[in-house]
Image (tube, rainbow, N blue to C red):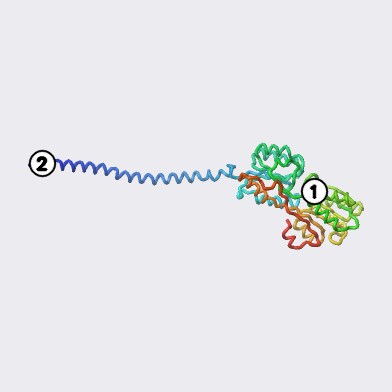
Amino acid sequence: MKKKVLAAIMAATMVLGLAACGSKEAAAPAEAPKEEAAAPAQEEEAPAEAEEEAAPEEEAAPAEGSGELIKVGIINNDPNESGYRTANDKDLKAMFTEENGYEASFAYSNKNDEQISSAQKFIQDGVDYLLISAADTAGWDSVLTDAQNEGIRVILFDRVIDADESLYEASIVSDMAKEGETAVEWLKGQGLSEYNIIHLQGVMGSAAQKGRSGALDAAVESEGWKLVTQQTAEWNAEKAQQIVQSVIDSGESFNVIYAENDDMAKGAVAALDKANISHGVGKDVVIMGFDCNKWALEELLKQNWNYDGQCNPFQSSYIDEIIKTIQGGGSPAQKTIIMDEKGFDATEITQEDVDNFGI
């Protein structure tokens, strides 16, 4: 019996001893989590610092041309050429901004060879799109082929060029020939007893000059009208004034001034005013211009001028839509978009017309 009791006591002692050993082993892990719990707090702070340092690199990527911004090279005529061109340039600059997803570069010249050189540079720079308002309709095939070979898309705006349609994606342009025809039809309708015309042309070879001159040339031939002089004033008011002044000095009679833009019409009127020759509705000389600058339409409203043909400079929204279509994998719905335009008669124009259509 004593032996059994002793054995039981010894067994109980061993169990207590084992339990005590188990308690010590369990205690060690219990403290470890406290140490491990502190570690994550430090590790959470470290990634936060790393993210703060990495963020500027991610934000800087688009500015370095990572591909998020669409690179466009825009070739235009001199923005100081006329009020129309100033409005056209302003419209493009408002659209092609980083905020709208573009990285835009601009090049300006009224000379075709300089524009072509700018296009070649833009191709070397690796732009995604070339936007071109050509100074001259001819000479563009080679550079457009180079652009196509480099995967650069070409979109024409404002003016057409003489090139195969396969070399560009789309054109958003004015119908210059129609502008001329509308103006000439209006002039025919005036029923003058005779037509002795001073014709002030724009930059020779441009789409605007060809269209507006072509319509008048055809009417001169078919109607028997007389061209007192036909000269280019290159869109410039001062040159136009000099041409008209030389006709006045020659003593040759005239009763119509057909100026291919508003600035040249303005210069012509300056020469008439200097010579005390009346102009406008019911006066000695009929004054015709193009572009519909607001100040020119105001001259119509005052009946100091007789006619002004609209030329719409706001093409950027159409171009933006075409680019977004192409970027989305599509093709433009139309190869050629013709801007909606009309002519204004001094006897019919209203202040609302001036406010709505003046540029």
Q: Residue under circle 1?
A: 211
The location of residue 26, given as percent across then percent down, is 27, 43
* Position of residue 60 in the picture relative to residue 359 (left or right): left
* Position of residue 286 in the picture relative to residue 329 (left or right): right
Asked which secondary structure carries label 1, the reply is helix
Q: Amino acid at mark 2?
A: Leu
Which of the numbered marks, if any, corresponds to residue 49? Answer: none
The location of residue 239, given as percent across then percent down, is 82, 49
Single out the residue that lies furthest toward the front.
333
Let me know if residue 123 appears in the view.
Answer: yes
As drawn, 4 above or below 342: above
Which of the numbered marks, if any, corresponds to residue 6? Answer: 2
As drawn, 214 above or below 124: below
Residue count near mark 2 (Cα–Cα under 10 Å), binned few <14, some 14–19, many ≥20: few
As drawn, 300 above or below 129: below
Q: Amino acid at mark 1?
A: Gly
How many marks are shown on the rendered structure? 2
* Position of residue 177 in the picture relative to residue 91 (left or right): right
Please give the name of the residue rendered at 76% of the width and 58% of the height, measured from the top-left corner.
295
